[in-house]
Amino acid sequence: MGRATTRSLERVAASVGLLHGAGIEFELVKDVPDGGVLFALPALLFLGLLSKSREMFSMPEGFYPLESIFLLLGLMALARIPSLEALRYVAPGEWGKLIGLDRIPEVRTLRQKITALCAEQGSAQRWSNALAKQWMADEPECAGVFYADGHVRVYHGKLTDLPRRYIARERLCLRGTTDYWVNAMDGRPFFVVSCAVDPGLLSVLRDQIVPRLKADVPNQPSEEELEADPLLSRFTIVFDREGYSPQFFAQMKEQRIAVLTYHKFPGELWPEQEFGPHQLSLVNGEQVTMELAERGVRLSNDLWVREVRHLSEKGHQSSILSTDYRSDLTKVAVAMFARWCQETFFKYMRQHYNLDRLIEYGTEAIPDTIRVINPAWRQLDSQIRRQNALLSRELLRFAEIQLTQEMEPHQVEAYQSKKGQLQQAIEERRHHIEQLKAQRKAIAKHIEIKDLPDKDRFQRLRSEKKHFIDTIKLIAYRAETALAQLARDKIKRLDDARSLIRQLFRTEVDLIPDQQNKVLTVRLHPMTTQAHDEILRHICAELTATETVFPGTDLRLIYEISGSC
């Protein structure tokens, strides 16, 4: 029956259709490796890991109930098991004890279960949408400011020639898929929009992100409140310079949505006398003093916006534009500078949760109506850019050729000849650039996928399972963050709190069920220092107070650390 298999009769019954989901049963066990991941169970359940699983997903019931698959995937993410295949290298029986079964499924079985769960196209997206709406409703204080930014998942495979994108962290143009993430001020994610064909940040904001936020964000002002107060906004969207567009700012203002971004063309420096010290409370709770100044500025489309500038110690001025006309300039600065939380989220998810990893191999067709950049237009545009660069070099060389007073007559003739030849080359290049521009103007910049030449056609990577697993990773990240916030009651720095929680997840536990009193005690082994033990005793008390019941049982969870009784 396989390694660590002890419930053989139930497995045989499930194989012939007489058992639909084995019962969750715990027994007294000690020294279970990685058992600390069970400390995240209350947060996983609160964040919706199982709340809509039966409602939105289904699979043929066998030995493993549906809830055990979701729970296993969540615990795998927290334990930093990098992939489904890596599950081959963990003890199946030990992990089975953590979820109340004799062993966890084999990799092949787990992949079959995930395939069945994702059989209905769009189910993962609907689940993700429902969770995002729930998170916003549960955290209304975090649902007033949203950060939107793109992250490129690089693809090195050969199944399809995805369009190239510039990867800032690599400083290269590589093939990949762009995901646009929407996060809270502290970096916690709400949802993601994946684009095999990247239309750009502005297009995604206008067509997908803003309509979804307008529908889902809780506690928005009513129409009567908006009419009564012309400066009131529904919520605020923060993004980087890629989204700079006075026209977009005006469109958002008409919808009563505030925008916040860096000024792409800040102009000349402001006098240092305008700046004054302001006390700011950053998103991590740190108190800092910054030199800030504010003006009103009219953009190219006559839109009047706020411009807030920060003066650094080295004299650099960071310019921020905002259509939030009510908030104090300190809140505007804090909201803009908190964008680093989203960048930190991307880095952390890539390092610890394998955010960019493929879940399955394969491609699928892109809808024919999706518009892409015309390859012919792109080729002409590339030629124009190259010719403009060469023209700039020639103009620089032309300016460097100077006639001095001490030159001999033959030197003057050489100077005139060289200058004349260079002038002729410059005129020819300018004429060539004008011809290329005329050709580019005569060609449509965007065409539909169906109109692409056969040699330029491509397909997108399969996304259903990827979206499903990524949603579980988001739940796991939020659960880890919740535990880190509990640790911060005793630890000042968030990074230190996260390190402790990661150590907690890899620590052994004893599982002590008490069927008579209907409790399951998760007893953690001591940590490396007494100080860490004290912090974890605080976390144990907070988690026990939630009175969480293990899914599929009537056992209430009690958390403690050895020596704390």
Image: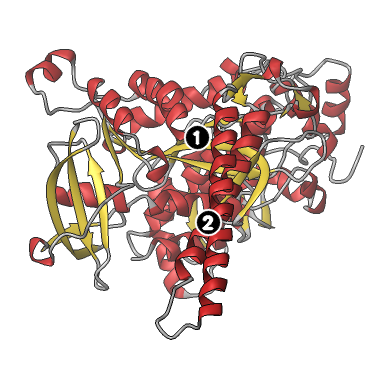
Q: Position of residue 560 (x, y in %)?
A: 48, 56
Residue drawn at x 49%, y 67% as measured from the top left: 563
**Is residue 516 visible in the rendered structure shown here?**
no
Residue drawn at x 19%, y 21% as measured from the top left: 221
Q: Residues within 10 Å of mark 1 (few under 14, many from 20)?
A: some
Q: Tell me, for residue 378, which label it has, or none.
A: none
Residue furthest right in the image: 1
- Secondary structure of residue under mark 1: helix
Q: Tell me, for residue 423, which label it has, or none.
A: 2
CB-based contact (under 8 Å), mark 1 and mark 2: no
Residue furthest front in the image: 409
Q: In the rendered image, which quarter is residue 390 located in?
A: bottom right
Location of the C terminus by quadrant is bottom left
Residue drawn at x 63%, y 60% as measured from the top left: 508
Between residues 67 and 52, which one lies in front from this camera angle? 52
For this view, does 408 lie left or right of residue 217?
A: right
Q: Nearer the viewer, mark 1 or mark 2?
A: 2
Residue type indicated by callout 1: Leu
Q: Tell me, for residue 45, which label it has, or none.
A: 1
Q: Position of residue 318 (x, y in %)?
A: 27, 57
Q: Residues within 10 Å of mark 2 (few under 14, many from 20)?
A: some
Q: Position of residue 479 (x, y in %)?
A: 48, 44
Q: Is residue 137 above or below residue 532?
A: above
Residue type indicated by callout 2: Gln
Between residues 258 and 321, which one lies in front from this camera angle? 321
